[in-house]
Image (cartoon, helix red, strand yellow):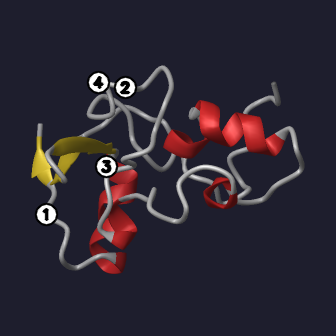
């Protein structure tokens, strides 16, 4: 399997930790939706909660920032899940997704 992509590639930490992404990255794809989710797996910026995620973060997405993997300072309740967000990205998510509510842990 491919190594986890560098943090400056624009791919969310959650995606980098997903076995679906690792499988398609080995095939040279830039988007796992083509192979796996049919475009239905996405994060809070698009109103989703990574519904097709498979990997080591299952059940623990509230612990890590979904963007960078840092320690979560808050959570985003969405789709029946809690998605973690670090303090440095709270301002970013609020600026980019007004409909998403961030709660402190």
Question: In this orientation, which residue lies closer to the viewer: 32 or 10?
Answer: 32
Whether label 2 touches label 4, CB < 8 Å: yes
Task: Tell me the residue that label 1 is attached to.
Answer: 101
Question: In this orientation, which residue lies closer to the viewer: 52 or 43?
Answer: 52
Measuring 13% from the left and 63% from the top, which residue is drawn there? 101
Measuring 76% from the left and 44% from the top, which residue is drawn there? 24
The image quadrant where one finds the C terminus is top left
**In-image side of 18 versus 79 (left or right):** right
Task: Tell me the residue that label 2 is attached to.
Answer: 58
Q: Secondary structure at mark 3?
A: helix
Q: Secondary structure at mark 2?
A: loop
The image quadrant where one finds the N terminus is top right
Which comes before the other along the chain, label 1 or label 2? 2
Whether label 2 touches label 3, CB < 8 Å: no
Q: Which mark is residue 87?
A: 3
Which comes before the other along the chain, label 2 or label 3? 2
Give the quarter of the image for residue 100.
bottom left
Q: Which mark is residue 59?
A: 4
Q: Position of residue 21 (x, y in %)?
A: 66, 42
Rate crowding at label 1 as few (under 14), some (14 to 19) or many (20 or more) other CA atoms within 10 Å.
Answer: few
- Residue at mark 1 to residue at mark 2: CA–CA distance: 21 Å
């Amino acid at each position: 399997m491919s190594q986890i992509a560098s943090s400056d590639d624009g791919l969310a930490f959650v995606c980098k930790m997903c076995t679906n992404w690792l499988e398609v990255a080995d095939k040279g794809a830039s988007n796992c939706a083509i192979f796996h989710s049919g475009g239905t797996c996405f994060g809070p910026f698009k109103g989703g909660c990574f519904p097709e995620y498979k990997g080591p973060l299952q059940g623990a997405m509230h612990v890590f920032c979904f963007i960078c993997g840092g320690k979560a300072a808050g959570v985003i309740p969405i789709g029946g899940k809690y998605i973690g967000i670090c303090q440095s990205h709270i301002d970013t998510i609020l600026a980019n997704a007004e409909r998403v509510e961030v709660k402190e842990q």
